[in-house]
Amino acid sequence: MRDQRASLPGAALAWIVAFLMFFPILWMLMTAFKTEAGAIANPPLIIFRPVLESFAAALSQSGYVLFAENSIVISLVSTVLAIAIAFPAAYSMAFQPGRRTQDMLVWMLSTKMLPPVGVLVPIYIIARDTGLLDTRTALVIVDMLMNLPIVVWMLFSFFRDIPKDILEAAQMDGAGPRRQMIYLLLPLASPGIASAALLAIILSWNEAFWSINLTASHAGTLAAYIARYSAPEGLFWAKLSAASVLAVAPILIFGSLAQRRLVRGLTAGAVK
Amino acid sequence: MSASVSIANRAVAPADLLSRSRRRVAWTLLSPAVIVLALWAFVPLIMTLLYSFQRYNLLYPERRGFVGFRNYGYLLSESSFWTAIINTIVMVVAVLVATIVLGVLFSLLLNQNFKGRAVARLMVIAPFFVLPPVAALIWKNLLFDPLYGLIGWLLKLVGLPAVAWFTHFPMIALIIIVAWEWTPFATLILLTALQSLDPEQLEAARMDGAKSVNRVIYIVLPHLARPIAITIMMESIFLLSIFAEILTTTAGGPGDATTTLTYLIYIRALLDFNIGSASAAGVLAIILANIVAFFLMRAVARNLEA
Amino acid sequence: MQQSTPAPMPLAAVPLAAALLAGLSLAPLPAAAASLTIATVNNPDMLVMQKLSPEFTKETGINLNWVVLPENTLRQRVTTDIATKSGTFDIVTIGTFEVPQWGKNSWLSPIGDLGAAYDMNDIFASVRAGLSYKGALYAVPFYAESSMLYYRKDLFQAAGLTMPDQPTYDEIAKFADKLTDPSKGVYGMCLRGLPGWGENMAFLTTLVNTFGGEWFNMKWEPQLTSPAWQKAITFYVDLMKKDGPPNATSNGFTENLALFSTGKCGMWIDATVAAGYLYDPSKSKVAADVAVAPAPIEVTPHGAHWLWSWALGIPETTHHLADAKKFLTWATSKSYIELVGKTNGWVAVPPGTRESTYKNPDYLKAAPFAPLVEKMILSADPEHPTLNPVPYTGVQFVGIPEFQGIGTTVGQDIAAALAGQTSVAQALAKAQASTKRTMTEAGYLQ
């Protein structure tokens, strides 16, 4: 079925909202093309001649490629692992709920209640003793564990939107949980799975605390890369903007591709 | 590809056998998640608990010892501790309200069918991609700064005096920044949920003459009840640990106007290197978070099951 | 039910792919010839060092792995590693605050003798003293700074003012009143207001020092409610309220640098390293109009300007002591300074460490402020920072580990007074109480 074309005021309002939300990022993008002096000009420069010197500074010497590669590998692998583990768990809680299900959900979320800064020393010692300091593996594991509760919750939520009868019918026909999950749930819940994956990837991408504290020169992610450009002595707004653009660009591109997946999931339809 | 289903000849098993094997299956499916999270939760938690009962400062490695509840007593009698709790609650509640309200509005707007809506969606979601310290710096310097920022410039244009946000309205400024970062999160979840809303229902209501406002209130909102509940639960967990934004803008000040519990833990752990006190604060943070979660679950539990 | 859905991936393939990718992530890194892991701050001098380090690798064949972070994050990162004896770093960049403490804990390898060519005595004695514990040097200074007064010659001329050779704070307050002109966007006095032991408290400690106050008396009792403190902080708050920029509580070094270089400040008291930026016409709008003067004094010259040095130290957990010493020698040698002068310009040379730098005509030509900076550094005395005797060392900080937390908390309280949330007396009373608590808990007081 086709959605009706939106009304003009409706669409206009949507664009206004989009512009307002995006504006700070747009401003950052513009600043990335200014010189440092231009970045702090007052009144703020809206029309200016773009330069690339800030990007050059942000790329020179900084190992951007290594950081980007680490970010990509770590966020993808940890997300895949998180979904692989969360998927059956969410299935079980959504379709075979027991008395304990709600408690289980809350408990999972509670594992995120301890602010990471409070467990820095214990985790650091564990990482050191297992030889995982400054490795990508350590970050994959940590990110996966940090995102797992969120992924479980999101999948659980989307699974609840799927009418039980479909799965029950399959159950009656003799399909076990594995079959149900692979052949029914996966396609039906794909927008939800895509959202959860996108969220997990973003959270892992932006994860700064462990990325900085558990790594040295080999396994740092773009979050550590950005830290370099924050608050050094001397002016840095343009360089920081350039570095941020470089740090956000890969995931923004990825996000726009994933967007289409979400939309396609919509047209595939999950409705009765 | 149609679901391939084998039609096995199976007698219908008696009820309790089925349920027992079902439970076992359910547990097998759940167990990897539970085991993995349990390790992650318990090991550091036990260590933190142990440290919280010790006198342990990284800079004085030779002075370790069991001191019972002294760290806790010290924290609880500190006025900044209670201020931190209040600040935390204020910030979390304000951001939750802002993001949910805006999230509902934005998701409704973006669910419409208009040209280029994929681009508009990306623009609305984009703030979530930006690293928190960078987001904070953008707002602090490029927008809020009374001398260099855009907002100050706009205010001057209309003849209003520039506002020193972080001096006089630090909490409000912080809430704005955090709400900007997290509204995309709520929007994303609610938007995906809206897509499973049957348009025919809405269409039927429209044809019956229901005004659009009523359509929203009576059809859309109930459908969104569970995703909203889920969003609240998840967001509050994240918001409780907000830290980088405070560090980059106000450093917890002026005074302790923007010191939250997490920031207090940071000061103890990474400025004082007082691991004992930081661990105690961490344990107290967990207790607080659990209390919050308990009340939240009370409020939204029905929506989870519905 | 008929659906056109994309073919679902067989569930088994997912963990397989994950394992593959995980395997990739575990791939062993190419074995390197001797390599050192260096943790350093992200300021311009260090970034220049990083850029020039291929020269070192060429000379010695030792590879360098860099970890570059902002100051506070770096300090935390390195402290966590060193205190847990994890041995991640071979060389760490640390400051005059932590070197004596870490030397005391035996966390650093003593530097010892680096050879005659290195000419240790060429390095300023005061700087060396700040990096030693019980006479043994634990880190070599990469650069050093003090604080001084920057002011706008043109604005002074226009207002008919002259800067004396050694200004006092009373004179400065009068100057600031005359220079402030919000309609032109000029504020007479820019000072740090951002809370932090190394931010606003660095300056405020020197202010308190020169007003005759101190942090602790000989019995380690905090003195924050003493008359000297009251006077100093009241002076600061009044001055900033009258002649300071708005939003001062968010302004640290960087923000004030931006303000001064774009012409918004009449005067600014801060680190001597800002000079290189402010005098550079490609970066600063006021390069032609900026001048420097000694940091103001009030009741006593003791502790009126600070001493800070970023230095390279070697954790004693390192396995590459000899190689690390080679790098230290290279990065702080006379030839390195020459190298920077030739490749990056003399104004970018790391300041404040060697006498030979300050006798070099190329440097003096490029940096007209250099003689004053030298004077400031040589006269900053961390051993006697105050009017009255004190049990601690450090000019703009107190060299005890607890100071990071204490300084930050007090900095926050004073920022509240500056923001008008509390009175100065209230802020100081609060600061005194919390400092006393901390000192009691830490065992300094009974």
Image (tube, rainbow, N blue to C red):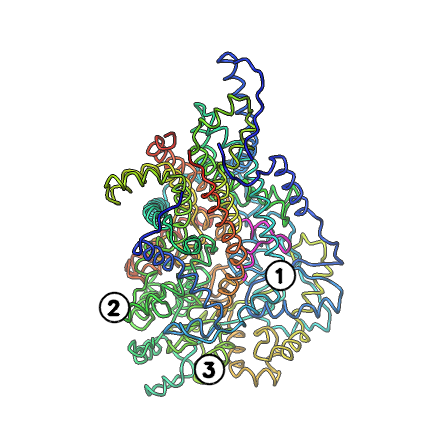
Residue B98: image location, x then y, percent: 33, 49
Left-right relation of C19 to C254: right
User: Distance between the Cα atoms at labels 2 and 1?
Assistant: 45 Å
Q: Residue at x 46, y 82 (%)?
A: C287
Q: Which residue is mark 1?
A: A63
Q: Which residue is mark 3?
A: C287
Q: Is residue B213 magenta?
A: no
Residue C194: image location, x then y, percent: 40, 62
Query: Could you say which is closer to the camera, residue C9 or residue C35?
Result: C9
Question: Which amino acid lies under the numbered mark 1 shown in the image of this protein?
Answer: Gly
The chain letter for the residue carrying disc 2 is B
Q: Which residue is mark 2?
A: B160
> Vertical placement of A177 versus C115: above or below?
above
Residue B224: image location, x then y, percent: 35, 39
Can residue C220 be seen here? The reply is no
Question: Which amino acid lies under the numbered mark 3 shown in the image of this protein?
Answer: Ala
The chain letter for the residue carrying disc 1 is A
Residue B218: image location, x then y, percent: 27, 38
Residue C43 in which image quadrant: bottom right
Q: Residue at x 25, y 68 (%)?
A: B160
Tag in front: 3 or 2: 2
Question: Which amino acid lies under the numbered mark 2 shown in the image of this protein?
Answer: Leu
